[in-house]
Image: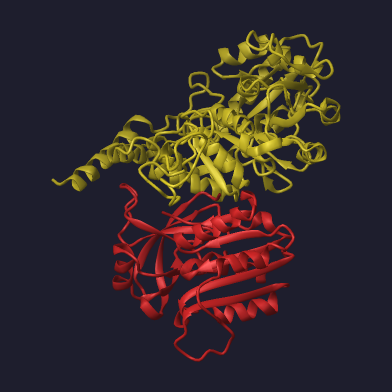
Amino acid sequence: MNHEEIRTNILKLVQDYYNEKFIKKPFIPGESVVRYAGRVFDEKELVNLVSSSLDFWLTAGPHAEAFENELADFFGVEDAALVNSGSSANLLAISALTSPKLLDRRLKPGDEVITVASGFPTTVAPIVQNSLVPVFVDVSPGTYNISTEDIEKAVSSCTKAVFLAHTLGNPFDIDHVKAIAVKYGLWLIEDNCDALGSRYGGKLTGTFGDLATLSFYPAHHITMGEGGCVITDNEDLAKIIRSFRDWGRDCYCASGEDNTCGLRFSQQFGDLPAGYDHKYVYSHIGYNLKVTDMQAAIGREQLKKLQAFIKKRKENFNLIYKGLEKFNNKIILPQATPKSDPAWFGFPVTIKENQCFTRTQLIQFLNNNKIHTRNLFGGNLIRQPAFKDIEKRVVGDLKNTDLIMNNTFFIGVYPDLGREEINYVLEKFDEFFQQN
Amino acid sequence: MSVPRKVKAVVADLKKYRDDVTLYRLKPELPVKFRPGQFLHLALDNYDPSYNWPESRVFSMADAPNKEFIDILVSPKGNFTNRMISEISIGRQVWLKLPYGTFNFRGSAGKDVVLIAGGTGISPFISFLEDLAESTDEYRSISLFYGVRNSDLIIFEENFKRYVQEINSFQYKVYCEKINNKLSFSIEQGILPIKGLVDQTISFTNPVYYLSGPKSMIECFEKELKDKAIPEERIFYDKWE
């Protein structure tokens, strides 16, 4: 056999392996686990992964480049820079805004960034890591997004950016936030990690801010294991993002390419000798946050399934909503932000105050019945050990953020959940609320 | 900068001029984006994504963006471009990757713009002027000075005449070292008069200079402009190694 024939055989075996190892087993109520999230894939992801490993390109290569193009097309934006996680994407987004290339608009130590404390830590961590000051604003229960009436109160002469997540896929009030950003000349970064496919006014979230981030961790709308992306329609920011991602270099040649600018040996940078090889000129204190081509190979197959995944998430959300609506005297049901059409990450539930049961009792009951739950990530981040002593400014009392910390959790809506699983989940909620 | 994309293209048309200078019309198989002033890489050999990009050369686009076709103007100067001249016929497949380059006109709207081109260096200016003819962008003035070796190589004369009609405050002057035939338009015999052009345009209001053409031409103008204390941020070059 020649190498092509061997490859064909290997990939056929991979398909067989998938069918033997990963084919979905029937749901058995009470025995099967109802997860809050998980990777959803078929033999195509596995085949593309192995095929890519046989190419042995290893570092970001043709699959990564193709994925970036396909994702940029999905969003209709200039640039999608693939990175190794959503958290890395957040780090890059904030770091990029510190670039000296942005002149007087660059973020400098001590500048303030408006955000919320109810969310995932790595929305806030890059602000701190870049010696900026997070300004925390309270959120609204139900939407779990920033309270619009408080945003403008948070603006000071030091405020330079707004960095917010579309919580659990639910878009924040983009019209309002964007109006504030424009009014005060602030950068707007959308943490779109949990909201791939969500829309606001018919337009995809992630396309409103100067920058937006995505995560492809297995719990997310599509996965490549570890992965993330920064998207932007701003050509200058795109170049800066890629520089920070790729060691801080000034050169933008793709892996394996040289002299795409045609000026490799004829430019002058810093105090380097004239004509110093542009490939080794560094214009930023950067990182290496690239993915392997094997991750991107998985992502390309996932991207083909994205529309179906989004549809299924919405269907599951609606089924759960209808099933739990009758308990709205005990729990706060999630509310899609006006004008939005969320591709929900999960189904958030907040126990109303003064109930005869606690969140812990409810989630323990669900967990005992093999229904996985998760808190709304870090709860109130400023009460976390890593964040409680950081330099920060807090607007108001974050009362709702504390409510979420104490009373909120979410369950899954991810595409692998079918009617059987959803009905089972709803039966268990019924059972619990009959007893409480 | 848009993410550079690699795309197959077919040579839809070509026109040969004196000394094998050739205008290629390429039809990419997918729509591609670029800004006036940017350039592409063209490879003659097949590109297999499992391997590195093959040998290629860079060419500025010589037409407005967002069209079905991309035009490039090539003057054979080395092995690769001579291979292009001998191998490329209509229907030939090539590979492109684009867009590249920061030579652009975005920041100069509303200003006095001076375009100085030599030979095939006219390409990015054609892209700019074609795009401008279709846009609402306004410049205080646009002055094009274009030098060619031979009157047979004045390829875009009809375009220039059209720009005079379509673009406010557009003017041009062509300089030609050797005039072979009778021309229907006025032309200056000789090379681009570096000192004269700088002296003529320096009195504009903070003019912005764009230079595109042979390296020696660019360096001579650059020196003259710097000698006349034109700040660097008002001089843009389209030059490659």
Tell which residue pokes out farthest to the bottom in this image: B182
Quarter of the rendering occupied by the N terminus of chain A: top left
Give left or right: position of A154 versus A21.
right
Give left or right: position of A58 versus A34.
left
Q: Is residue B230 visible?
A: yes
Tell which residue pokes out farthest to the left in this image: A1
Chain B painted colour: red
Give left or right: position of A259 versus A310.
left
Tell me the residue at 71%/59% (across/down): B109
Give left or right: position of A371 versus B51.
right
Quarter of the rendering occupied by the C terminus of chain A: top right
Q: Nearer the viewer, residue B136 or A326?
A: B136
Q: Is residue A82 above or below residue B210?
A: above
Q: Position of residue B215 (x, y in %)?
A: 45, 59
Colour scheme shown: by chain
Q: Position of residue B36 (x, y in %)?
A: 58, 61
Q: Is residue B155 visible?
A: no
Q: Position of residue B25 (x, y in %)?
A: 45, 72
Q: Position of residue A120 (x, y in %)?
A: 63, 22
Tell how many labels. Answer: 0
Quadrant location of residue A352? top right
Quadrant location of residue A151? top right
Tell me the residue at 26%/38% (across/down): A13
Chain A painted colour: yellow
Tell me the residue at 31%/41% (across/down): A51
Q: Nearer the viewer, residue A391 or A395?
A: A391
